[in-house]
Amino acid sequence: MKTSDFDYYLPPELVAQVPLPRRDSSRLMTLGREDGKISHRGFSELTDILRPGDALILNDSRVIPARLSGEKIPTGGAIEFLLLTQRGDGVWEILTRPGRKAKPGARFSFGGGLMVGEILEVLPDGNRLARFEQEGDFFSALDSIGEMPLPHYITRALDDAERYQTVYAKERGSAAAPTAGLHFTPGLLEALRQKGIETGFVTLHVGLGTFRPVVAEEISGHYMHMERYTLPRETAELINRAKGRGGRVIAAGSTACRTVESAAERHGEIIPCSGETGLFLYPGGESRFRVLDGLLTNFHLPKSTLIMLVAAFAGYEGTMSAYKEAVKERYRFFSFGDAMLIL
């Protein structure tokens, strides 16, 4: 299939610029995976839709203040780093601006010297590897001097940075939020548990490659970015337990989806594991869904790997019809927008 097959018209005013006052007050479109039937609900009605015995898998990665503004040592020229993926103890893959200043051996100061970064290597795609030094804990220093990076389509500053975190965010390392989880509240999670719907957590640290457009004419020619993931023992047991009793396994977001399906593809079964994944799920691709029975997701950018993943799960025609319906019904799109549940 061609990348252009996943384009659609979106009125600019439908891009949600701010979160709603209540997380679970967003709208929820449901889409039948087999029959393509669409219905319109509220996200808080999720407890009425899911069944006792189902398992809901959530990504507990926490967004870090990944944007750093500093200066070159010793000339003082301005530089910006954007942390993408941790590659080792104190070593990160980063984007830099301007890139011409960030050559191997160049050193940069952030926060008035609170943190120093040295460029180790220029990668083939233009990203850099940098080693950081600071007094004390890296993340504590980052919290004091870094800025939260919001997607390029959000042009308004957040009043509360926690609204770009899920209520269950725990493991620090993402450059962007796993946005399908932004709709949950502690009360809704408790209501799901009370109904007998188990919740399990995985960790996949989201890189900004998630938002990069697919530029290849044929989608099979796209190179998928790598992201680190962990599927813990408790969650592996939960998934296997749900499958054993005939329950459905539903992933909240593409990141939870890719974690579970990467584990199944790599090991042939769901077991505790961790590693890096570049799993690219798209219609007609070599990879297939081995575990999931449902997918909860936001509405994604045209021609993105995310809408391709949805189409791989729900079918191309059903997905594009659902997006056309969402535009017609004036749903809110992207990170702070409404949600869709595919079952």
Image (cartoon, helix red, strand yellow):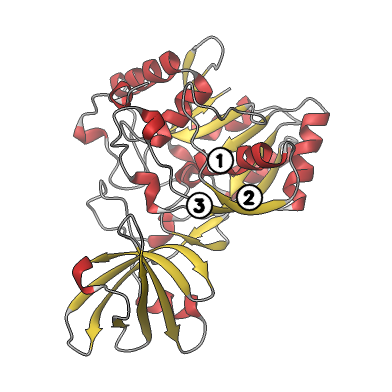
Q: Determine crowd level at label 1: few under 14, some 14-19, many 20+ residues with C-alpha closer than 10 A.
A: many
Residue denoted by label 3 = 227
Whether residue 225 is visible? yes
Instruction: Establish if 265 lies above or below 63.
Output: above
Give residue 172's position: percent from left, percent from top: 52, 64
Secondary-structure class at tag 2: strand
Marks 1 and 3: CB-CB under 8 Å? yes
Secondary-structure class at tag 1: helix
Q: Which one is nearer the viewer's eye here, 343 or 67?
A: 67
Instruction: Establish if 336 lies above or below 233.
Output: above
Instruction: Say left or right for 106 vs 120.
Output: left
Residue at 22%, 90% in the rendered image: 74
Amino acid type, callout 2: Val
The CA span between labels 2 and 3 is 13 Å
Instruction: Establish if 148 lies above or below 204.
Output: below
Residue at 38%, 15% in the rendered image: 321
Whether residue 230 is visible? no
Point out which mark residue 258 bears: 1
Amino acid type, callout 1: Arg
Q: Residue furthest top?
A: 35
Closer to the N terminus: mark 2 or mark 3? Answer: 2
Residue denoted by label 2 = 202
Count how many numbered circles sit on residues in the image: 3
Q: Determine crowd level at label 2: few under 14, some 14-19, many 20+ residues with C-alpha closer than 10 A.
A: many
Closer to viewer: mark 2 or mark 1: 1
Closer to viewer: mark 2 or mark 3: 3
Closer to the N terminus: mark 1 or mark 3? Answer: 3
